[in-house]
Amino acid sequence: MENQQIKKMYEQAEDFMPLNGTDYVELYVSNARQAAHFYKSAMGFHSLAFSGLETGNKEFESYVVVQNKIRLVLSSPLRSGTEMGRHIDKHGDGVKVVALWVDDAASAYHEAVKRGAKSYMEPRVEEDAFGQVVRSGIHAYGEVVHIFVERKDYNGPFLPGYQAWETIYNPEPIGLEYIDHMVGNVGHNQMNKWVDFYKNVMGFAQILSFDDKDISTKYTALMSKVMSSGNGRVKFPINEPADGLKKSQVEEYLDFYEGEGVQHIAVATNNIIDTVTKLRERGVLFLEVPDSYYDSLTERVGKIEEELETLKNLRILVDRDDEGYLLQLFSKPVQSRPTLFFEIIQRKGATSFGKGNFKALFEALEREQELRGTL
């Protein structure tokens, strides 16, 4: 039943700016070179492109890493007093740009602005020896921006202003395929404002909704609505805090990020057991659910292909909807502040988001919050 409702919701999307997918995600970080090494060493990304002093960029340095369809841009300022530096000082390392691949960046921009979007960057043509790219941009929640990227006339390594970044060290990939979804945390009573933004400004449809009865424990709660482009290639769940006895994970995020922003990036794999095994071997830390989670797992989700003991050893979570099941696991924050983290997800037919795991996940998060003294 849930998936039939999702399909009906997709039909409500207005694709007046068709999105081909996520083009890249740019993070502002305090040390781009070291961050790039982390994403390569720990998460199996490879070197792709570079912008900095050597390319004539005297303001900031950016390293682009890639794994299958996922491109991350890691950027740091080269001097004090910059807008990028202010962003890092306020928020710590975090996502600034969620770039969307489109066929016509000028059209996407004008469609969004005429529907109420605040302009971030008017359409502009960027050129080099490899051709041209058209980019434009709008503001979203917090300081996040969406940049529309049109690259049909470009065959360079990434974007004009970047050169190919070739390195001897390119560790084995870990099987990450594409960005499944990206979750935004917004303030109290702000969720519906941004749901309306994605619906009215970008033509998205709301495909799922979770309230504090769905996502709660004894102490904390949140509410969430999932927005999706009509073709389902771009999905943005939006979370806001709900009243609880103690401080929720969303409130903790808002406190330490000092504002609204991207809470986590969900990356898809075709073999979560292999991917998580390699991530753990490389030192990536994950949330841990208790052994008791697995005692009734098969009763709750039915027959699955994976060995229960293997999932238990890796602490991988499982949930089922009427289209199939999914496996997922959530990392601990990947920087000092308890803000941005990653979700590893493998879908075996399921199109939902692991509703059956919410309670176990939140309890695991609360144990981490308790250790940090922020619950």
Image (spheres, grey):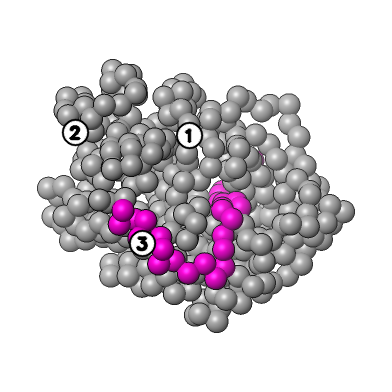
Question: Who comes first in sequence, dot 1 or dot 3?
Answer: 3
Query: CB of mark 2 within 8 Å of CB of mark 3?
Result: no
Counting from the top left corner in percent of width and height, residue 275 is at 47, 27
Q: Is residue 240 left or right of residue 40?
A: left
Within 10 Å of disc 3 (Cα), the crowding (few <14, some 14-19, many 20+) is some
Kind of residue at disc 2: Arg
Instruction: Establish if 134 lies above or below 330.
Output: below
Q: Which residue is found at the position 57% from the left and 68% from the top?
A: 17
Determine which residue is flagged by label 1: 269
Q: Which residue is found at the position 20% from the left and 52% from the top?
A: 214
Q: Is residue 231 left or right of residue 320?
A: right
Residue 372 is a magenta residue: no
Kind of residue at disc 3: Met
Mark 2 to mark 3 CA distance (whole Å): 26 Å
- Element type at mark 3: helix
Q: Is residue 247 left or right of residue 42?
A: left
Kind of residue at disc 1: Thr
Determine which residue is flagged by label 3: 9
**Mark 1 vs mark 3: in front:** 3
Magenta range is: 4-33
Between 42 and 98, the residue placed more toward the observer is 98
Determine which residue is flagged by label 2: 300
